[in-house]
Each structure stands twice: as structure tokens, then as C-alpha cells.
Amino acid sequence: MNKLRSVFNSRGYWAGLALIGVAALAVALYYQYGVGDEPCQVCIHARLWVVAVVLTGAVMCLLPLNRGTQLIANLVVLTSGAGLGERAWYLYQLENGIGNGSCQFQLGMPDWFAVDQWFPWLFEVRNLCSFTPEMLLGLSMAESLMLFAIGLCLTVTTALFMPQQPHQSGPPAS
């Protein structure tokens, strides 16, 4: 328990979250540029949630690690994981014909947040939503993203409920 607590209260935890997010983005870019599967609007929304995890992890590597900063950052990552899970579930429903939605050929962000124009190589919508490519173990990308989001949320929830200070085993000091 002490080892786990020390991991969640370290810069290594935050660096790990950032690196896992970078790896997820690298996989997305491999499928886009290496395999040729262009991203849809919902896929770009998922990328934005992953970028939020990366940025939060990177910022936490620089900020003082105290209860307040860690609480806020863990809540941001938990929200990002939930948002990623929602987008993955929506995409899964679309590709399996069980949802009642669609997607557009534009990202749909306001002008002041035009990430698709600032970083088109990462955030430009280039396809309509349809089937996602098959990944490891025969899972679709939407299914893989759902598992990734669940794992992220479980990890962060564990970090949120991990006690900050070890409990003293002896009588209180006088």
C-alpha cells in the first residue's frame, strides 16, 4: 500500500500518464499516416481528450505536488477519461449501427479554439464516421479506446482515494 501511495504521489505517476497519452496519440497518427485510416470528427474529439491527459501530466511534472494540485489534476484526468470513454462509446455505436447519431466533416469547435487550423496534422477531420480499424486482439479502435478510457478512469480513481499520509501504527505522540 505504501509503494502504491508513493507512486501516485510522485512525478513519475504524472510523467507516466503523459507518456501513455503520447503513446496513444502516436498509435492514432500511425493509423492515420502509416495505414491511411483518416480520422473522423469523433476520433478528433477523442484525440483532444487524450491531449488533455498529456498536458495535465506534463504540467504536473512542473508544479509542486501537494494535495490541492494533485486533486485538481486527477479530476481533470478523470474528466478527460470519461470524455474519451463517451466519445469511444458513441463511435462504437455508430460503427455497429446501434446509435442514433452521426458526425460531421468539420470539427465543430468555436473560432477561438480552432485547433484543426492550428495543428491540422493532428486535429483536422478528414473522414466521416464509419468503421474503425482493427487493432490488437481483433478489437476495433473504438473498443480499444473504451478499454483505454476505463483503465485510465480506474487508475485515477484509485489515485483519488489513496490516502495521502501513511497511518501511524503506534499511539499518538504527546
Image (cartoon, rainbow, N blue to C red):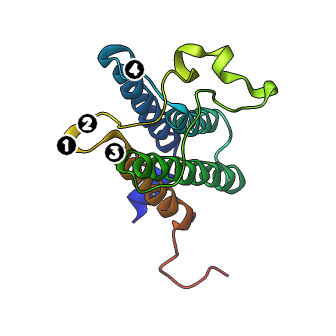
Neighbour tally class for label 4: few under 14, some 14-19, many 20 plus, Cα within 10 Å: some
Instruction: Identify residue type, mark 2.
Output: Glu
Q: Earlier in the sequence, mark 1 or mark 4?
A: 4
Along the polypeptide, which appears first: circle 2 or circle 4? Answer: 4
How many labels sit on residues?
4
Q: Which residue was labeled with disc 1?
A: 138
Q: Which residue is mark 4?
A: 32
Q: Residues within 10 Å of mark 3 (few under 14, many from 20)?
A: some
**Residue 67 seen in render:** yes
Q: Residue at x 48, y 56 (%)?
A: 153
- Residue 28, placed above or below residue 158: above
Please say if 96 is above or below 123: below
The residue at which mark 3 appears reads as 144
In the rendered view of the protein, which quadrant contains the N terminus? bottom left
Residue beneath disc 2: 134
At 51% from the left and 65% from the top, the residue drawn is 162
Task: Report the front residue among 130 and 174.
Answer: 130
